[in-house]
Image: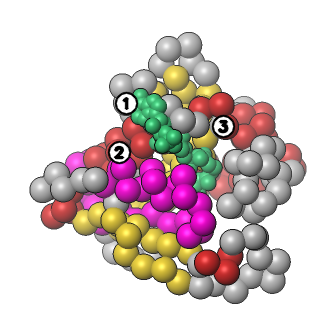
Amino acid sequence: METERLRLRRFGADDVELLVELDSDLEVMRFLTGEATPREVIVREVLPGMLRVYGEHPGLGTFAAEEKDGGAFVGWFGLQPTARPATVDVGYRLNRGAWGKGYATEGTRMLIDYAFTELKVDRVVADTMAVNHRSRAVMRRSGLRFTRLWHEHFDDPLPGTEFGEVEYAIDRRTWEAGDRA
Ligand SMILES: CC(C)(COP(=O)(O)OP(=O)(O)OC[C@H]1O[C@@H](n2cnc3c(N)ncnc32)[C@H](O)[C@@H]1OP(=O)(O)O)[C@@H](O)C(=O)NCCC(=O)NCCS
């Protein structure tokens, strides 16, 4: 899969270091876990989990994104299965050096198009903490619309948890109408 500036590929067993480095930036992890992901967790859980999704859900998964110009790893984009029928969840996590270039929106729009055209889904959703304004802006620019806000209980909540979680979504009819932000 590719966009104007990015190439997306599946992760492989030898991509541990890319993920360790990405998840070691506390600014990247601020609205996710608030801490770096330990290397052993990447090795034992994160990467095997990604590889498992490729096998269990053809077409879905977490994809490494690289700049077409030079091949630098910029982060990942993901399409994950959800409990709801014909609905997939889109997500992204980019190296801080790749922020502010429009890459997240570019990759997300491509994955939404891919989900409707190739995977034949009826709905694409995305969620994040309400205070993750950069992520919400990506959702809006990608054509997703705000659908709901809810509160979750965490034993060790991240700062901003009190403002809740938000979901954005786009359904097939809206996507076909090209009604994007
Ligand atoms: C969420 C995240 C991907 C957003 O990244 P981002 O760089 O803000 O988003 P985009 O790639 O769409 O870039 C948009 C910015 O690039 C600018 N830009 C520069 N060149 C551009 C171009 N050629 N095309 C489009 N936008 C461009 C835009 O003006 C915009 O700038 P602004 O933020 O000052 O308004 C990033 O902050 C991240 O990885 N965060 C950590 C992980 C995370 O929180 N993930 C979401 C959890 S659900």
The disc at residue 109 is 2
Residue labelled with disc 3: 95
Residue drawn at (28%, 53%), measured in percent from left and top? 181
The answer to whether 137 appears left or right of 112 in the picture is right
Specify the amino acid type for callout 1: Thr
- Residue 119 placed where, x, y %? 30, 53
User: Does mark 3's beta carbon lie closer than 8 Å to ligand 1?
Assistant: yes
Sooner in the amino-acid sequence: mark 2 or mark 3: 3
Sooner in the amino-acid sequence: mark 3 or mark 1: 1
- Residue 86 placed where, x, y %? 31, 68
The answer to whether 145 appears left or right of 69 in the picture is left
- Is 27 contained in the magenta span? no
Disc 3 to disc 1, how far (Cα)? 18 Å
Sooner in the amino-acid sequence: mark 1 or mark 2: 1
Q: Nearer the viewer, residue 156 or 8?
A: 156
The residue range painted magenta reads 115-143
The answer to whether 91 appears left or right of 13 in the picture is left
Which residue is outermost to the left?
177
Disc 2 to disc 3, how far (Cα)? 19 Å
Q: In the figure, 16 relative to 6: above or below?
A: below
Mark 2 Cα shell of 10 Å, populated few (<14), some (14-19), many (≥20): many
Residue drawn at (69%, 61%), measured in percent from left and top? 32
Mark 1 Cα shell of 10 Å, populated few (<14), some (14-19), many (≥20): some
**Circle 1: element type:** loop
Specify the amino acid type for callout 2: Arg
Specify the amino acid type for callout 3: Asn
Residue drawn at (42%, 24%), measured in percent from left and top? 5
Residue labelled with disc 1: 3
Quarter of the image that includes the N terminus = top left
- Residue 118 placed where, x, y %? 27, 48
- Is 133 contained in the magenta span? yes
